[in-house]
Amino acid sequence: MSNDLSRFLMSRRRFGALAGAFGLAVGFAPTLISRAFAQAKETADKIIHGKSPELIIHNAKLGVTETPLELLRKHKHTPKEILFSRYHYPHEGNAAWYATTAAPPAELVKNWSIRVDGLVKRPRTVTIADLQAMPQEQRVAVLQCAGNGRSFYAAKQKVAGGQWQNGGMGNVVWEGVPLKPFLKGLEMEPSPAARWLTAEGWDQPATRVGTDFAKSYRLDDEALDHAILALKMNGEPIPAIHGGPVRLIIPGFYGNMNVKLLTVLMLAAEQSPSTYQSMAYRMPLVPVEPGTFGANDYTLENSRPTYGQAIKSVIFSPLPSDSPKSGMVEITGVAFNDGMAPITSVEVSADGGKSWHMAKIETPESPWAWHHWSVKTRIGAGEQTLMSRATDALGRTQPINGLARWNPRGYEWNGVERSAVKFA
Ligand SMILES: Nc1nc2c(c(=O)[nH]1)N[C@H]1C(S)=C(S)[C@@H](COP(=O)(O)O)O[C@H]1N2
Ligand SMILES: [Mo]
């Protein structure tokens, strides 16, 4: 089998065949999967083996799931059973081997390699065993889809795509090989013309018309100094659904920049022509109005990639489903940004923005981790609008009117958090 495997891994277009082989090898036959899809009530555990049935499903075919805040707030580090997930190519039919919270099959891990190539004198091929032998570092970081909060843009005009609320994120412990020393250690002699690093995942579009999931980063971007080739998530081998056996983690960057199932690192003079780099996951450089700028009007000149996360806060308690009582109430939640400047304040309102209270911020585990905050205030009976607003040392803050950042693909929502809660 392992010879077959390496051949499959070499010819990466044999997507369906390899996926099929693994569907059988890991014991969930494609027929079982398709039967699950035929059922009326779909739950996340039927789409992704090992996920909680309580997750919100945005797209069953692609395995896009969101974590309800009631679950998310229970854990300091988001467990694999409830962490949101997202891939761009269908799980259905090919019964993707990575549609599981289990680690990738040992055979596949053994044969996995990363090609490091491009504008270098000596291209290299690195195995998982090579990576495991190198010094490892930990990064606690928020993983968040750039589309998290997209549903809130609907108050201006609904944006196509998963209608994410606030649960397209999690706080995760990653561990792996620091990227910059890794590249240096390979002694490839890169050309000075190499200004971009492109990372590609193993997953492929089902047809040749589609484009690879490839993402490019400026080699001189400070964020890359903290990047790791992660082998572990929350202390164990990275679950297949979350990109094992190896994933590029750039703390502080939006989810899409954290390429899963890493197979290629390319040094180049230009960024990748993949539409995932040039068209999707971009923000217009100037504010746009619905109807004046379309989802396919993005160019490298009029837009920028969704790199560092816009500063944001989310209220974890009380949630509307808590049916809280009036009186002295403790409001809690989390805040985070791109990790480039400390978060200096979280202001909270329990009366729709008439009065504000300074929350106490706990020391975070890392600059990129959830910053837990809390504040106690008296709240009267009836429906109240709770609000939270985080600000960092660079003066970056959440806009009162998040709709001002409306964009045709609905990314980077970071409007002041608002939640209507009824107090008894
Ligand atoms: N190889 C690969 N990596 C990928 C993607 C993908 O489709 N393929 N999706 C990206 C996007 S858009 C997001 S939000 C995150 C989701 O990570 P998760 O599934 O571990 O939560 O993975 C990113 N990395
Ligand atoms: Mo995403």
Image: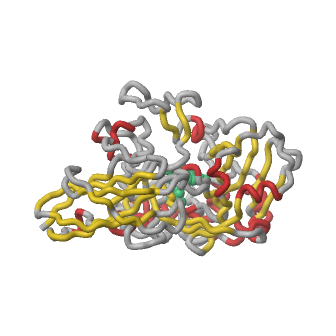
Residue 33 visible: yes
Residue extending farthest bottom:
235
Q: Quadrant of the N terminus?
A: bottom right
Residue in view at x 49 percent, y 28 percent: 297
What coloring was used for the rendering?
secondary structure
Residue 390 in the image, given as x and y percentages of width and height: 38, 54
Q: Quadrant of the C terminus?
A: bottom left
Residue in view at x 48 percent, y 71 percent: 77
Q: Is residue 353 left or right of residue 4?
A: left
Residue 384 in the image, given as x and y percentages of width and height: 17, 57
Q: Nearer the viewer, residue 277 or 338?
A: 338
Q: Is residue 380 left or right of residue 297?
A: left
Q: Nearer the viewer, residue 107 or 216?
A: 216
Q: Specify the quadrant of the image occupied by residue 211.
A: top right
Residue 167 in the image, given as x and y percentages of width and height: 39, 59
Residue extending farthest right:
121
Q: Nearer the viewer, residue 423 or 410?
A: 423
Q: How many marks?
A: 0
Residue 148 in the image, given as x and y percentages of width and height: 42, 51
Residue in view at x 36 percent, y 57 percent: 346
Q: Is residue 194 left or right of residue 209?
A: right
Residue 1 visible: no
